[in-house]
């Protein structure tokens, strides 16, 4: 990604498009790169990959359990298998295969959950994946990653390809603006990226919620004189506990933001660590509450549940009122 000025945004592609182009780049140099799909080469942006590398893609059809089993078999034989399927089906219908064939058997499958969160919008709760962080966090031997922008996506695919352990990569559908990190350290799984610095409140967000958190931080600064830290916590597991602790000690309050249920995801992972280490701050989890979501586009759903510039800014102002 080209360098951008501090606190500016550039229009980007959908992360899935970057996933596809990065996978093609890797496959050019490595014949062991294999894509395995469940009738999802179109939705997974893998048509160009299939045209260029017809011997390095396996189409399973709408059979997610078989998808994971075949990918595990390929991985056990030395292939770098990327199993691509809608996140809602991959992490529910094939959960037993993920648990046993991949994680327990220590097969380094790269599970790619596409159209994640509420990306499918009006198709409703059957097609939403608001459980994937929670169920996969409970499975040993699994790295969980939700890139926020094109840069994080490209780096995540390259790191995943080189991993000798299982990994789950989560992608939405819409174009994602670039996020310029304050810290220029090399991208690593398990190390969050600081997008903006401030001492009043912190937004710890992941995936496609990082951008609205940044927008809210800018609004807070302009309208209220409140300076917010924004962190892209792209790796849900292992979590960057060092950064979380440092941020909690610096800021007066913390808001976590995720396109996931408020149960079992980023927010609860952060809260658990902080409380178990006697770090007590005003704290709010912003995500999808314990209900079937309203009907609408991803943006409609985000706005309804306060995962937006205005909604997050309002939550921050209210939370800071609780600080003693």
Image (cartoon, rainbow, N blue to C red):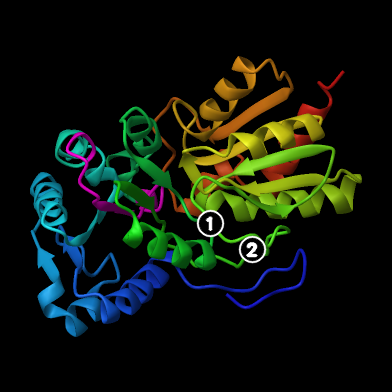
Q: Quadrant of residue 59?
A: bottom left
Residue at left 23%, top 51%? 109
Q: What residue is pinned by disc 2?
A: 179
Per the image, is 32 magenta? no
Viewer can see residue 134: yes
Residue nearest the observer in this picture, 123 or 68:
68
Q: Give the magenta-colored segment's residue range.
A: 103-122
Residue at left 58%, top 29%? 270
Q: What residue is pinned by disc 1?
A: 148
Residue at left 65%, top 47%? 231
Residue nearest the observer in this picture, 176 or 19:
19
Viewer can see residue 251: no
Q: Earlier in the sequence, mark 1 or mark 2?
A: 1
Pinpoint residue 311: horizontal percent, then vertical percent.
68, 42
Cα distance in 3D space between marks 1 and 2: 8 Å
Element type where label 2 sits in the image? loop
- Taking the image as shown, residue 75 lies to the left or right of residue 266, namely left
Pinpoint residue 201: horizontal percent, then vertical percent.
78, 37
> Against 301, is 84 above or below?
below
């Amino acid at each position: 990604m080209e360098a951008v000025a501090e606190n500016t945004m550039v229009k980007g592609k959908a992360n899935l498009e970057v996933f596809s182009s990065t996978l093609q780049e890797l496959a050019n140099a490595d014949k062991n790169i294999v894509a395995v799909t469940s009738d999802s080469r179109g939705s997974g942006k893998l048509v160009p990959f299939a045209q260029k590398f017809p011997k390095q893609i396996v189409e399973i059809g709408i059979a997610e359990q078989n998808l994971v089993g075949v990918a595990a078999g390929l991985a056990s034989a030395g292939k770098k298998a990327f199993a691509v399927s809608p996140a809602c089906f991959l992490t529910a219908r094939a959960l037993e295969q993920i648990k046993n064939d991949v994680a327990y058997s220590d097969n380094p499958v790269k599970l790619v959950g596409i159209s994640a969160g509420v990306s499918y919008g009006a198709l409703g709760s059957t097609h939403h994946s608001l459980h994937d962080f929670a169920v996969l966090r409970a499975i040993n031997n699994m790295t969980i990653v939700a890139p926020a922008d094109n840069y994080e996506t490209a780096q995540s695919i390259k790191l995943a390809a080189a991993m000798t352990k299982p990994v789950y990569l989560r992608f939405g559908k819409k174009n994602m603006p670039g996020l310029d990190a304050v810290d220029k350290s090399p991208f690593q799984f398990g190390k969050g990226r600081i997008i903006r610095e401030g001492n009043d409140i912190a937004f710890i967000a992941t995936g496609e919620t990082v951008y609205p958190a940044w927008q809210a931080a800018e609004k807070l600064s302009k309208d209220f004189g409140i300076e917010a830290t924004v962190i892209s916590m792209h790796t849900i597991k292992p979590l960057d506990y060092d950064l979380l602790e440092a941020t909690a000690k610096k800021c007066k309050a913390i808001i976590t933001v995720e396109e996931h249920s408020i149960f079992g995801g980023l927010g609860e992972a952060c809260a658990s660590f902080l409380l178990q280490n006697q770090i007590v701050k005003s704290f709010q989890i912003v995500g999808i509450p314990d209900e079937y979501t309203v009907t609408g586009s991803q943006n409609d759903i985000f706005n309804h549940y306060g995962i937006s510039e205005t909604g997050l800014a309002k939550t921050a102002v209210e939370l800071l009122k609780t600080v003693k």
